[in-house]
Amino acid sequence: MTTLQSRAASAYATVSLDSRASAAGGADLVILLIEGIRDRIRLAKLAMQQRDVQTKLRHLNKALEIMTEGLRAHLNIKSGGEIAANLDDLYAYCSVRLLHANLRNDASALDEVSELLVPLLDAWNSLRNGTPSSSAVEALVEVTRALRSSVPSVPSVQRMYGASAYAGYSSLRA
């Protein structure tokens, strides 16, 4: 794919996502945001393989923006209970891993984040597709518990990446 074709495809994808987001609500919007992150990760990985640093950076920045401003910033930690707390930790971890992937050109970190989002996407799709509300919420609780237990704790990540690894995200919890 040429650079011009890539730009055209990217512009179309942005317009398509914007159009879908304006018509969506609730679970649909969360699904669109997660799909948007996964799409940006895929495009960043492709750019990484092509050694296109600017395109990689643009897509990873967009993935981080969706993660922090689209998903994480809208969590209500106080009333969202365990699900919100688990999602907050997951999104923070994924953000750190995306930053790591960018810094180290680590495609495996991109794969990790994309795969961590799959069960979450499946749970939201289940909720959207008419699973009875209590069953869907229970499934979401279980998925977020499983995801939270599959990623390192905040102190572990801080030991791996430095004490400031989550510092930029602490204001979102307030």
Image (cartoon, rainbow, N blue to C red):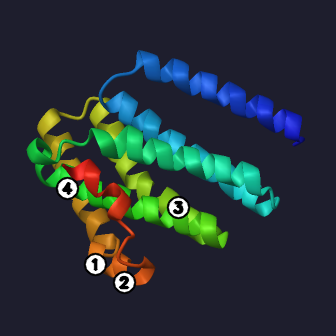
In the rendered image, residue 55, in percent from the top left (x then y), is placed at 73, 49
Residue bearing mark 3:
98
The amino acid marked with disc number 1 is Pro
The amino acid marked with disc number 3 is Leu
Q: Is residue 143 visible?
A: no
The residue drawn where x is 28% and y is 38% is 74
For the residues labelled 4 and 3, the Cα–Cα distance comes to: 20 Å
In the rendered image, residue 164, in percent from the top left (x then y), is placed at 37, 71
Q: Secondary structure at mark 3?
A: helix
Q: Could you classify mark 3 by the number of other residues whose Cα lies within 10 Å: few (under 14), some (14-19), or many (20 or more)?
A: many
The residue drawn where x is 44% and y is 53% is 118
Judging depth in this view, the residue of 146 and 173 nearest the camera is 173
For the residues labelled 3 and 1, the Cα–Cα distance comes to: 18 Å
The residue drawn where x is 32% and y is 81% is 156
Q: Secondary structure at mark 4?
A: helix
Q: Are marks 1 and 2 in contact (CB under 8 Å)?
A: yes
Query: Which disc is residue 155 wearing?
Result: 1
Q: In the rendered view, would you say 84 is above or below 94?
A: above
For the residues labelled 1 and 2, the Cα–Cα distance comes to: 6 Å
The amino acid marked with disc number 4 is Ala
Residue bearing mark 2:
159
Mark with earlier residue (4, 3): 4
The residue drawn where x is 74% and y is 61% is 48
Residue bearing mark 4:
85
Q: Could you classify mark 1 by the number of other residues whose Cα lies within 10 Å: few (under 14), some (14-19), or many (20 or more)?
A: few
Could you tell whether 153 is left or right of 109 in the image? left
Query: Which disc is residue 30 wearing?
Result: none
Q: Is residue 120 visible?
A: yes
As drawn, the residue found furthest toward the right would be 2
